[in-house]
Amino acid sequence: MEKAGSEKSTLHLRNKHRSRYDFKTLIESCAELAHFVGVNKYGDESIDFANPDAVKILNKALLKHFYQIDFWDIPEGYLCPPIPGRADYIHYIADLLASCHQQNIPTGKKVKVLDIGVGANCVYPIIGHQEYGWSFVGSDIDEVAIRSAKNIADVNPSLKNAIEIRLQSSKSAIFKHIIHKEERFELTICNPPFHASAAEAQAGSQRKARNLGHKNYAKPILNFGGQHSELWTKGGELAFVGQMIEESKLFKNQCFWFTSLVSKSENLPAIYAMLNRAGVAETRTNNMSTGNKITRIVAWTFLTAAEQAAW
């Protein structure tokens, strides 16, 4: 078990997860969590973050308590994301939109966001809608993930008619077949698979298990889970983001901002070069820090200042 920090000061100021986990309150929202809570070596209440079942129930409690989500579940083995980091991405892109709206964050269903790789968990659309009222389209290549995300969106009354889930019919496409003709999005978001191979993904899992103090780290159980398409892709995140940039040119007048997380800082120079070649009008980068992990949000738009004002 790990020590919970009293204040996660690296998280965005609007992030509801800056304070340490209040397990008493979370158990009131989700009684199942009590089974996984114990006192760690620091004398604090915590869960075993190396246990995937404990992480899943913690997520369930966080989504119920902070976002009023009564039903949330994912199929076994699918990615169970850390909620604080997901919330950070949403708040930073809200700031991005505000920068083009006289520093006011636009809210409500008219703000349409596309989540590339929504996953079985549907977490980005949940947080984005519950915090800002935005409407979402979530896409994925995995039919099991699609069914799970659609079920979460349909079963929770607060999400109904706000989240549409679309199956990406082509394993080699990102925006194609998903963005409809004449459809417009204020934002696209993506947390790309950042490993280049199954072996690289396994090595990453072993490192994480070792850091969590897992004794059997050579054969780790992924505490956050993840399918092949969620964890790795040929060429890693650089190839994926490169393809995203290439395809974004086809929809440059239909999306205000394209954004993606970039996990590896060494990939940034190549990404900036690709954006330059694509002829984007503006690029922005935001550093995001959750715990010991630093990642970046890279955003680009093809719209000139005049076109942005007209949008």
Image (tube, rainbow, N blue to C red):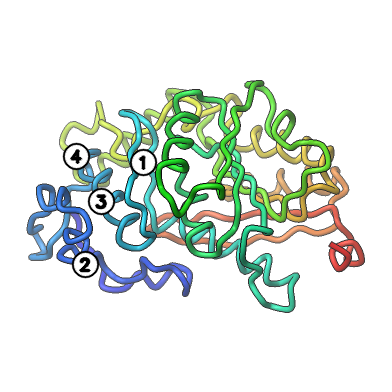
For disc 3, the neighbor class at 10 Å (few under 14, some 14 to 19, many from 20) is many
In the figure, residue 114 lies in which quadrant? Answer: top right
Q: Amino acid at mark 2?
A: Asp
Question: Which residue is under mark 4?
Answer: 214
Vertical position of residue 207 compared to residue 168: above or below: below
Whether tag 3 and tag 2 are in contact, CB under 8 A, the answer is no
Label 2, residues with CA under 10 Å away: few <14, some 14-19, many ≥20: few
Evaluate if marks 1 and 2 touch, with contact meaning CB atoms under 8 Å apart.
no
> What's the distance in space between the residues labelled 4 and 2, CA to CA?
24 Å
Instruction: Work out how far the residue at label 1 is from the one at label 2, CA to CA, in angstroms.
Output: 20 Å
The residue depicted at 50 percent of the width and 27 percent of the height is: 229
- The mark that comes first in sequence, 4 or 1, is 1
Q: Which percent across, then down, holds residue 134?
A: 59, 58
Query: Which residue is disc 3 drawn over?
Result: 58
Q: Position of residue 44 (x, y in %)?
A: 12, 65
The residue identified by callout 1 is 80
User: Which badge, 4 or 2, comes first in the chain's sequence?
Assistant: 2
Kindly identify the amino acid type of the residue bearing the numbered disc 4.
His
- Name the element at disc 3: helix
Question: Residue at point 58% right, 48% down?
Answer: 262
Amino acid at circle 1? Cys
Tell us which disc is closer to us: 3 or 4.
3
